[in-house]
């Protein structure tokens, strides 16, 4: 008898930290990780956009998930900026830790997953909406325990 061997595939993610919480971003969306030297404020921007900084000749907005998820951030002095690309646009996400990569079998449900496309779309329209309305578009599980798509 021959047994069918199922090859398990893995998915890779970049882990970033916000306060005492960790979020996962798909590895393929990550462009780079930067040390933050200076962030320039953007007048009139929502409070979760802490400013912008120049990266390779482009201005990248810096998003603070702590403001969106009401997470206590210990300090801003040692933050890193995880730059992700979505539909040709780049945004940065503040991280309290140096982001690192992990892999999981594809059948594992990942909590605190950030869908970059949903994040980007929510940020595009969020200038007219309060941050409270954004929580559902960023991370988490459905009530059935399955990852939202």
Image (cartoon, rainbow, N blue to C red):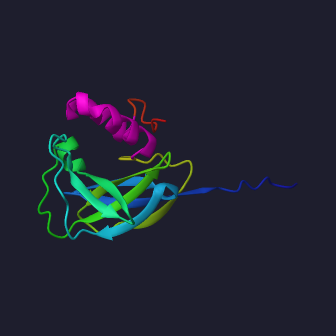
Viewer can see residue 126: yes
Residue 97 among magenta residues: no
Q: Quadrant of residue 137?
A: top left
User: In the image, residue 26 lies at what x, y percent?
Assistant: 47, 54
Q: Nearer the viewer, residue 44 or 48?
A: 44
Left or right of 61? Residue 14 is right
Residue in the picture at 38% in, 29% down = 143
The residue lying at 45 percent from left, 41 percent from top is 117
Q: Point out residue 140 in the picture as x, y percentages from the top left corner.
A: 36, 40
Q: Quadrant of the N terminus?
A: bottom right
Foreground of the two, 39 or 143: 39
| Between 63 and 110, the one nearer to me in the picture | 63
What residue is at 32 percent from the left and 31 percent from the top?
A: 125
Above/below status of 57 relative to 71: below
What number of labels is visible? 0
Q: Percent position (x, y) of residue 141?
A: 39, 37
Q: Quadrant of residue 24?
A: bottom left
Residue at (39% x, 41% y) in the render: 120
Q: Is residue 8 left or right of residue 25?
A: right
Q: Nearer the viewer, residue 148 or 55?
A: 55
Spot the residue most to the right.
1
Q: Main secondary structure of the magenta part?
A: helix
Check the image and report above or below for 98 versus 46: below
* Residue 98 appears in the figure: no
Q: Residue furthest front?
A: 57
Residue 15 location, x and y as percent?
Answer: 37, 60
What stretch of residues is rendered in magenta? 114-141
């Amino acid at each position: 008898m021959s047994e069918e061997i199922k090859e398990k595939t893995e998915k890779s993610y970049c882990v970033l930290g916000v306060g005492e919480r960790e979020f996962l971003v798909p590895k393929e969306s990550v462009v780079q990780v930067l040390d933050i030297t200076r962030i320039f404020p953007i007048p009139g921007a929502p409070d979760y956009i802490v400013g912008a900084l120049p990266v390779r000749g482009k201005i990248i907005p810096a998003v603070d998930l702590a403001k969106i998820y009401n997470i206590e951030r210990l300090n801003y002095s040692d933050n890193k900026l995880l730059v992700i690309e979505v539909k040709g646009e780049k945004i940065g996400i503040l991280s309290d830790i140096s982001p690192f990569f992990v892999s999981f079998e594809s059948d594992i449900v990942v909590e605190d997953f950030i869908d970059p496309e949903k994040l980007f779309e929510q940020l595009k329209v969020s200038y007219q909406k309060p941050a409270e309305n954004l929580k559902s578009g960023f991370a988490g599980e459905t009530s059935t325990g399955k990852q939202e798509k």
